[in-house]
Image: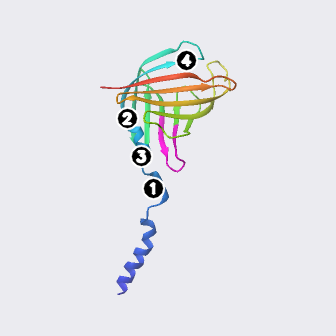
Amino acid sequence: MRMKNIVIALLLLAAPALAETASDRLAAPGPEHAWMDPLVGEWTVAMRVWSGPGVEPFELSGMTANRELILGGRYLREVLFGGDGTPMREATLGFNRLDGRYELVTVDSFEPGQMVYLSRSDATSDVLSLFGESTEAGMGTEPTGRKRDLRFDFVIEDADTNVQRIFVRYPAGEEYLFVEQRFTRAK
């Protein structure tokens, strides 16, 4: 009888530890995470950059990217490589089920700080828009320090093609396309 009471007491003490927590439920991938599935894989990347509105873009080719789901499918990690194989950007995209939004964090070899983007609504079947802001370093010898609003769009064209577009808007200015990266699935 004493042993039975000890076992019951141990089970009652362990029950809260065995119960699923809110963090467990919210951390588990949900249907929103499935939106990232078509982005997984090895990619060739062509990039165009516009230095300002109405300016002809310059092009970079020969880039590649690797995208994989990490941490049980909760996040998409992307590493973008230059033509020489040097990493140029790392990005992590996920859906925050607590706040009900997609979140993207990028670090790259072009900017001195991290870029943080948040969605304002759910993704459609083929487009996800996220929004952020940053302070521009600029291309000159001294930083410009200009503030800018950013929009980062993921566009899924088909199973083998997707596009990332970054739009910029400076205070009192019009939004314009700043960067376009076309991802084509590597065969």
**x, y percentage for residue 120?**
56, 39
For marks 4 and 3, give the CA distance: 35 Å
Residue lying at the far bottom of the rendered structure? 1
- Name the residue that disc number 2 marks: 38
Q: Are marks 2 and 1 in contact (CB under 8 Å)?
A: no
Q: Which mark is residue 50?
A: 4
Which secondary structure lies at badge 4?
A: loop
**Residue type, label 4:** Trp
Q: Residue at x 40, y 74 (%)?
A: 11
Instruction: Tell me residue 166's x, y (percent).
Output: 53, 26
Find the distance from the CA under tag 3 to the CA under tag 1: 13 Å
Reading the chain from its start, which is encountered first: label 3 or label 2?
A: 3
Query: Mark 1: which amino acid?
Result: Arg
Camera sees residue 114: no
From the image, which quarter does the N terminus lie in? bottom left
Q: Residue at x 59, y 25 (%)?
A: 168
- Quarter holding the C terminus is top left
| Front-lying residue, 138 or 59 | 59
Q: Cα distance, mark 4 to mark 2? A: 27 Å
Marks 4/1: CA distance?
Answer: 43 Å
Q: Which amino acid type is marked by label 3?
A: Pro
| Whole-percent x, y for residue 181 in the image | 46, 24
Mark 2: few/some/many CA within 10 Å (<14, 14-19, 20+) = some
Residue interval drawn in magenta: 91-104
Which label sits on residue 31?
Answer: 3
